[in-house]
Structures are given as structure tokens and as C-alpha cells.
Image (spheres, coloured by chain):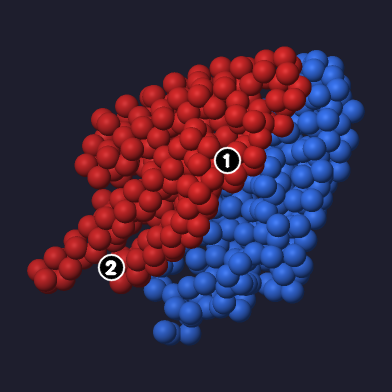
Chain colours: A red, B blue
């Protein structure tokens, strides 16, 4: 390739990675705001999260479009191919994270119509961990830092452990006070969504490992999958 | 393009679509078997579903690999581009369907350790609808039948309505008999998984519409999203 073509190609690869980073920022904001909407019973903020979700979907489409163009015009090989493929895959994960944040926001709208319940605190704590997890993996992507990605990957156990204990805690509340059952069921789904956001973070960590090293992180995940 | 090249290209497009159809069959089987495992309390079948899931993931990777090759070597445009892009996207949806079926199977393993509960019938009924929905949309894909895809898209309301009524029914059971709360919570997640399988079917219907007509089915979905 002529030198200027190589330069243009390398710029396009940077640009798609930057678009993924931008999309990551949108997803991270959605998760944090959805959690604040639950914790502070902020209905307006919940609505903002819901309204903003199409921006995340649009970012995914933009990344797909760029990826297809790169596949077709540049026929990337080896590490360049991994850059494009990883961008596409991470965009898919982030789109799901956005959907989960939107779903949490929708449940906040319902929860805010009922009496406040104490358990939102535990959910908030779990949410902060899931949010931090997402931030760390996005930083690892920005810095192509495979060790940071592996750290996130190993930390998913922690989110699963939180989820499992919250699951039991919520069931206990339901048993003690049947009037709480409906609100607890929504919190149960919120907790499940957070656990799934953690899983998407773990998937992104796997893609970063593949991006940087060209190899799968491992065939089997060490983490105990949340069974419930 | 030389005639034999055109023929080879067209065969490759057919091959990727066939691989998607095959993957669809695997996902459909996983959903149906997971439901049978719940309904018949069949622990062995649940384990089979869990063990088979890597085949679905492998099919997705195979489709991605073929798609990248087609993007790079054939630089498809217009309707050919849509064939490749749709195959990639549908494979993504089917991978998630496989995961949801696996999750249902895991919950079957837990449910089968407790007393049987009557409500598995309602879940089974809902599951049959979700399974039929998936089958119809896969048939629509195989036949490139846009009208059949639109029918599936419109029918998603039905699954959501079932889910919402089941959600309420399960809460009532929990309130009436606190000993049921744990099993009901698992059934609640199974019902949610079925509702999500329905959503993936709806997404596939949208991709078929785009594949055949080159246009999005609509900007807004008519269906009332399951809020709970």
C-alpha cells in the first residue's frame, strides 16, 4: 500500500475504536443514571435514560457501517482484522448494556409509584460494582491493556456473589412481608440486569484479550455463573 | 465478474444463509427441550440443553467468519450486502436465544429439586407460543417471506400479554403461599426469558424485512413492551 493509504487506513482503525469508546461512555452513563433513578427515586432521570437509548443504538449502527466499509475496502488481516471485528463485537455488547440500563429505568418508573423499600440500598451497592466494572473494562479497551482486562474478567465472580446474596435477601423480604412482593420482584429483575451488565463487561474483557494477543482468554470461564 | 465467479459468489451467499438456518434449528431445539425439561421435570434433558449450547456459539463464530470473508473478498453491495449483514445479525440473535434456553435449563435443574408446582403449566403454554413464534420467523427467513415476518412481528404483543398476566399470576401465588416464593422466582425468570426469546424473534423479523425490502420495518415498534 502507498504510504498515504496506510496512514488513512490506520486513521480509520483509530476512528472506529474511538467510536466504540464514545459508545462505551454513553452506555456507562445510562447504567449510572438508571441506578441513580432507582436510588434517588428520580422519575425524570429515569425518563432521560429511556429517551437517550436510541443514541446508543445509532452508535452501534454507525460502528457496523464503518466495519463493513473497512472489511470491504481494506480487507484487513491479522491484528487489523481483530481491531475491526472487536469493535463490532464490543458494540454489540454495549448495545445490550444500554437496553439493560433502559430496562432498569423502566422499573424505576414503576418502583417510584410504590412505597420506598430499604433494599434499594443493596441493589445500589451492587450497581456501583457493576458500573465500576464497566468503566474499568472500557478503560482497558482504550489503553489496549490486556492485564486490566484480565483483572475485570476475574472480578466478575464478585458481581455474581453479590447477585446471589441479593437474590436470597430479596426472597427473605418477600416471605416476611407479602406486600413487598411486587416491588421486590422488580428489584430482583434490576439485580439480574446488573448481573448481566457484569457479564457483558466480562465478554468485552475477552474481546480485548483477543484483540491484543490474538488468542482467546481461555476456553472455560473460571467464574461461577450466577445460577439463579 | 466472470460467470463462474458470480456463480461461486451466489453459492457462498446461499451457504451462509443455510448456516443461519441450521443455527436456527439448533436454537429452536434448545428452546423446546428446555421447556420440556421444565414441564416434564426432566433433569437429564436439561443437562443435554446445557451441554449442547457450545454448538450454537460455534455456529455463530462460523457465520461471522464466512461474513468477514465475503465482505473482504466479494465487497458485496446492495442486496448482496444485506444477505451477509442479515446473516451476521440473525446469528447474534440466535446466540442469545441459545443462552436463554440454557438459562431455562439451569433453572429446571433447580426447580426439579423442589416440590412440583402447578404454575409450570402456564409457563409451558407461554413457552409453546414463544417456540412457535421462533419457528415461524425461521421459516420466514428460509422462504424470504416478508409478509410472514411481519405477521410474527405483529404477534409479539401476544407473548408480552402472556408474560404480563403470568407475572401477576406468579406474584399472587407468592403472596398466598410464601413457601412457593423461591420456585416462583425461578418461574418468573423463566417467563422473562421466554418473553425475551419472543423479542429476539421480533428482531429477526425486522432483519428479514430489511433483507427483502432494503428498508426498516418501521421506526417504532407497535408492540407494548413488557414493562415488568
Residue A74 location, quadrant: bottom left
Q: Give the residue at the far bottom of this rendering.
A: B2
Q: Nearer the viewer, residue B157 or B97?
A: B157
Q: Is B117 or B205 nearer to us in this picture? A: B117
| Nearer-the-camera pick, A113 or A125 | A113
Q: Mark 2 and mark 1: span between their CA atoms?
A: 45 Å
Image quarter of residue B218: bottom right
Residue lying at the far left in this picture: please name it. A3
Q: Secondary structure at mark 1?
A: helix
Judging by the rendered image, the residue that carries numbered circle 2 is: A74
* Residue at x 19% of width, y 63% of height: A11
Q: Which residue is mark 1?
A: A108
Mark 2 neighbour density, 10 Å: few (under 14) some (14–19) many (20 or more): some
- Going from the N terminus, do you reach mark 2 or mark 1 first? 2
Q: Give residue A99's position: percent from left, percent from top.
A: 53, 49
Q: At x 17% / y 68%, what residue is drawn?
A: A8
Position of B179 with respect to A228 (left or right) is: right
Left or right of B128 in this view: B56: left
The answer to whether residue B132 is above or below residue B119 is: below
Say which mark, if any, is on residue B2.
Answer: none
| Mark closer to the observer (2, 1) | 1
Front position in the image: B47 or A115: A115
Say which chain tag 2 marks: A
Chain letter of the residue beneath label 1 in the structure image: A
* Residue drawn at (72%, 14%) of the image: A176
Q: Is residue B14 visible?
A: no
**Residue B69 against residue A4 in the figure, above or below:** above
Q: Secondary structure at mark 2?
A: helix
Image quarter of the N terminus of chain A: bottom left
| Relative to B168, residue B139 above or below | below
Please provide percent x and percent y for residue A51.
50, 57
* Both marks 2 and 1 on one chain: yes
Amino acid at each position: 500500500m502507498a504510504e498515504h493509504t496506510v496512514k488513512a487506513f490506520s486513521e480509520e482503525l483509530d476512528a472506529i475504536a474511538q467510536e466504540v469508546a464514545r459508545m462505551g461512555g454513553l452506555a456507562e452513563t445510562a447504567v449510572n443514571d438508571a441506578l441513580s433513578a432507582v436510588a434517588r427515586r428520580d422519575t425524570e432521570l429515569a425518563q432521560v435514560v429511556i429517551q437517550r437509548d436510541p443514541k446508543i443504538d445509532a452508535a452501534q449502527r454507525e460502528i457496523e457501517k464503518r466495519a463493513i466499509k473497512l472489511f470491504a475496502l481494506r480487507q484487513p488481516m491479522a491484528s487489523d482484522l481483530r481491531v475491526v471485528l472487536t469493535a463490532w463485537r464490543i458494540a454489540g455488547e454495549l448495545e445490550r448494556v444500554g437496553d439493560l440500563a433502559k430496562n432498569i429505568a423502566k422499573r424505576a418508573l414503576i418502583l417510584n409509584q410504590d412505597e420506598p423499600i430499604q433494599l434499594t440500598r443493596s441493589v445500589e451497592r451492587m450497581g456501583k460494582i457493576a458500573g465500576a466494572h464497566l468503566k474499568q473494562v472500557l478503560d482497558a479497551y482504550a489503553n489496549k491493556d490486556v492485564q486490566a482486562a484480565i483483572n475485570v474478567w476475574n472480578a466478575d465472580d464478585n458481581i455474581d456473589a453479590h447477585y446471589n446474596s441479593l437474590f436470597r435477601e430479596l426472597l427473605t423480604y418477600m416471605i416476611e412481608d407479602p406486600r413487598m412482593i411486587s416491588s421486590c420482584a422488580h428489584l430482583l429483575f434490576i439485580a439480574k440486569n446488573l448481573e448481566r451488565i457484569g457479564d457483558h463487561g466480562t465478554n468485552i474483557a475477552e474481546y480485548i484479550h483477543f484483540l491484543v494477543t490474538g488468542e482467546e482468554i481461555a476456553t472455560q470461564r473460571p467464574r461461577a455463573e450466577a445460577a439463579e
